[in-house]
Amino acid sequence: MSKGLPKRSEDYSLWYNELVKRADLAENSAVRGCMVIKPYGYSIWEKMQAELDRMFKETGHTNAYFPLFIPKSFLSKEASHVEGFAKECAVVTHYRLKNAEDGSGVIVDPDAKLEEELIVRPTSETVIWSTYKNWIQSYRDLPLLVNQWANVVRWEMRTRLFLRTAEFLWQEGHTAHATKEEAMEETIQMMNIYAQFAEDFMALPVVKGKKSENERFAGADETFCIEALMQDGKALQAGTSHFLGQNFAKAFDVKFASKEGGLEYVWGTSWGVSTRLMGALIMAHSDDNGLVLPPKLAPIQVVIVPIYRGEAELEAISAKANEIMASLRKAGVSVKYDNRDTYKPGWKFAEYELKGVPLRIGIGPRDLENGTIELARRDTLTKETFDLNSQPIEEKILGLLSEIQASIYNKAFKFRQEKTTEVNSWEEFKSVLNNKAGFVSAHWDGTSETEERIKELTKATIRCIPLDRKEEEGVCILTGKPSSGRVLFAKAY
Amino acid sequence: MSKGLPKRSEDYSLWYNELVKRADLAENSAVRGCMVIKPYGYSIWEKMQAELDRMFKETGHTNAYFPLFIPKSFLSKEASHVEGFAKECAVVTHYRLKNAEDGSGVIVDPDAKLEEELIVRPTSETVIWSTYKNWIQSYRDLPLLVNQWANVVRWEMRTRLFLRTAEFLWQEGHTAHATKEEAMEETIQMMNIYAQFAEDFMALPVVKGKKSENERFAGADETFCIEALMQDGKALQAGTSHFLGQNFAKAFDVKFASKEGGLEYVWGTSWGVSTRLMGALIMAHSDDNGLVLPPKLAPIQVVIVPIYRGEAELEAISAKANEIMASLRKAGVSVKYDNRDTYKPGWKFAEYELKGVPLRIGIGPRDLENGTIELARRDTLTKETFDLNSQPIEEKILGLLSEIQASIYNKAFKFRQEKTTEVNSWEEFKSVLNNKAGFVSAHWDGTSETEERIKELTKATIRCIPLDRKEEEGVCILTGKPSSGRVLFAKAY
């Protein structure tokens, strides 16, 4: 619609790419697979960071920073870990450039070869557990609750802005505990924090669950996750929390003197969410006019656009706008007044729709006469005339912002409900996947072989074993073997 | 003293290294030259970031994120830029590992060689200006005021925690302007913001000045800086702001349609401060007992230590401590109550001295009887008994914290004054450098040759041409040639 954004119904994938670029969220860089996060996109990410960081700190975690580089030998210390990451590693081999002797320009200096190659971190378990070995001697040093905000690199061949990029930003928590129980509690606590963040701030309903063995993090004993559904019926893994058992403690020989006087391996967890959440946020709520942002993460919650002819009208409207801005700012609402004379109101309306600003206030000369303003909601594209004398403006706006936040969540929740289907046969399974898409709840015999076969046949994977699933006798949709409960399948990002 | 920290007077360098490690600020990692910033150190860096970020935003800047990797050809586009950075570049040449066929472990896959090598960013001018080419078409797109918080890598051979590390954290501002004047104003504004941050928050007096041509940023027309003096009489460059002229605009062909209808090259600036500021903070104020932190950057401003025998005493003291904590927190003071029974009060006193907590409150049974507390200042190591009925506790503490902040600054200012010497002859110059050290204010003939010769002979460099220097006729201390004003020399970190 505005600025010729493609329609979701015609080409969802193109719609997403164009939206990301035109709403000034991100763009591809000159470096293959690496994105530039533009100021507007980054300001949404900053709001996400701030809330998550607060939640981490409230649960006793502190931030730290570990090296970007991982010696190749470190990565190899945990067998399944290196297996999982070796195929997509950016490798630093040299540490100097020099001028080519033939004058052809700058070349890598062959004399500056590293003794051991360094891997640009795809994740930091190995370098962090090598450090924890020095930090942990006794049970008094535990639990160790550390988080890191960082960039990581995974050399993906097919990339997509925010969803899958060679470099991305994330946080990775790495904790160490004296007991298995405590480590498991931490793993589940962090999954719950991610779910709470997704639902309360991103207005994104998620399913909490456990991954099947196939989909587990390389090096974990269990992976918990939150899974969300996008508007095209594909699932998106929005965050993971791993119970590492003693795998990394054993790989890096991290032991502690217990209260009872023994020497034991430490139990570990790791958990992360990334700029992928930006992709989830965009795809879950936006429409053919542009972004739809939940008010709690919108960098600009309210925009005021004056509708005027000539200086005198603008001056009178600006006086009213400034008054409204002052009231709203005092109430903690982020508000922008766009009085640029280089653009017309219609252009501005389309622009702020594209950018997903939750509420737009229009003020014209007739509004001034009547003591009213026009209020336009981004999520429903509805308008109302508000009488400024009927209620304090900040009350009205705060009320509307809460309503919008809830309404966006409810819409996504209802969509997910409609797009979650229980099936009991293979034919039904294929038919739902191909026509309706979404989450398909089905019985599975619990083996990796069957899961892989289903993926080959349908491209659907087990997104998770929902934590709240009922015990239920059934038979696997593919093999007919017995199953004790349903799992959620979907095609996924 | 406490925990056997070396004395500054005996081995300043060892004192610094040990202090950084023992106060849990940072440590060397398994990766050569890369540090681990530990949680306590990182929490100070976070406070610095928060204040700087606020100052940047208040002056109209927004954050964004650009790729970690820079194609080798980009670095080469600005001649003096590549000259400056080529000798210390980490180079990514491959994107995959594989299992060696002889079973010897994981090796770099020779089939996964990149077509063009990627440099891990030592600074981002090139990748950012290649992006700005797409963002800037018209004068309406200017000014572009962007900042990035990121990690960068410079393969330094001799590294030192915080002061010089292969990887470090920093912010880098990159702005684009329509006119030379506006770009120069921005350059100077950012130098002033850095100076204000150093003085108001770090309690660190700085000299604002311009770099000589030799010390200029590779690719800049002018470099402005703030220079601070450490307790060993060596200078430390604490922040730089570069006027880039049209150098990067020309290298990346970034032009804009002017208001008048012409097509012109854009004017640029870049500016940065890094985790090096942590080194400056530590070295400027700390003593033989440990860190001395200015209250505005201290993660814990007040610690309360109970002095007790037995449960009953602890309970009574804790009630009072909780009351005090509540009052202080309400007043915005960050306060910690250390009631661990695994450590004695004496051990805790030494620990918080080492960690630089500005104020310590001791409460014993006699204090409870008398309605008093013991207040100990970290900066002066002085104690007083405070009568809780004489003044609201939060008033007293807020007053003391301001006093400490000012007192730390004043001490550093006085030290710098004493260690700044005007000299008028070569003999005097050498003698001051070798005995008293500090800043040496001297006449210089303005040539790079003379500056280099002085560096060879004395290891001293021109730290800056102070912005507030007086016009003054004189003769160069080395060559006797005419000079129109003094510059500041020093040995530097």
Image: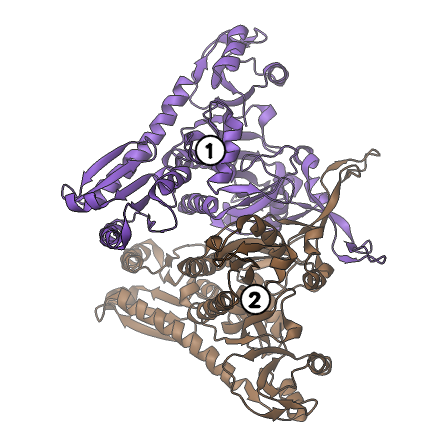
Chain colours: A brown, B purple
Give the residue at mark 1. B4
Q: Are marks 1 and 2 on the same chain?
A: no
> The residue marked by circle 2 belongs to what chain?
A
For this rendering, which residue is in front, B357 or A237? B357
Give the residue at mark 2. A242
Query: From the viewer's perspective, is residue A7 above or below residue A261?
Result: below
**Residue B408's spot in the image, x, y percent?**
35, 31
- What kind of element bears circle 1? helix
**Residue B131's spot in the image, x, y percent?**
61, 50
Side (left or right) of A406 relative to A230: left
In the image, what residue occupies the spot 49% across and 50% down?
B63
Side (left or right) of A262 relative to A193: right
Query: From the viewer's perspective, is residue B91 above or below residue B483?
Result: below
Of the two numbered discs 1 and 2 in the rendering, the one whose residue sits closer to the viewer:
1
Query: From the viewer's perspective, is residue A353 above or below residue A420?
Result: above
Whether residue A83 is visible to the viewer of this picture, yes or no, is: yes
In the image, what residue occupies the spot 47% across and 82% down?
A414
For this rendering, which residue is in front, B104 or A335? B104
Q: Which residue type does callout 1 highlight?
A: Gly
Whether residue B240 is visible to the viewer of this picture, yes or no, is: no
Q: Which residue type does callout 2 highlight?
A: His
- What kind of element bears circle 2? strand
In the image, what residue occupies the spot 63% across and 67% down?
A217
Query: Dividing the picture into quarters, in which one does residue B382 lie?
Result: top left
In the image, what residue occupies the spot 69% across and 56% down?
A77
**Number of dots carrying numbers:** 2
> The residue marked by circle 1 belongs to what chain?
B
- Crowding near pointer 2: few (<14 within 10 Å), some, many (20+)? many
**Residue B78's spot in the image, x, y percent?**
67, 37
**Residue B148's spot in the image, x, y percent?**
53, 47
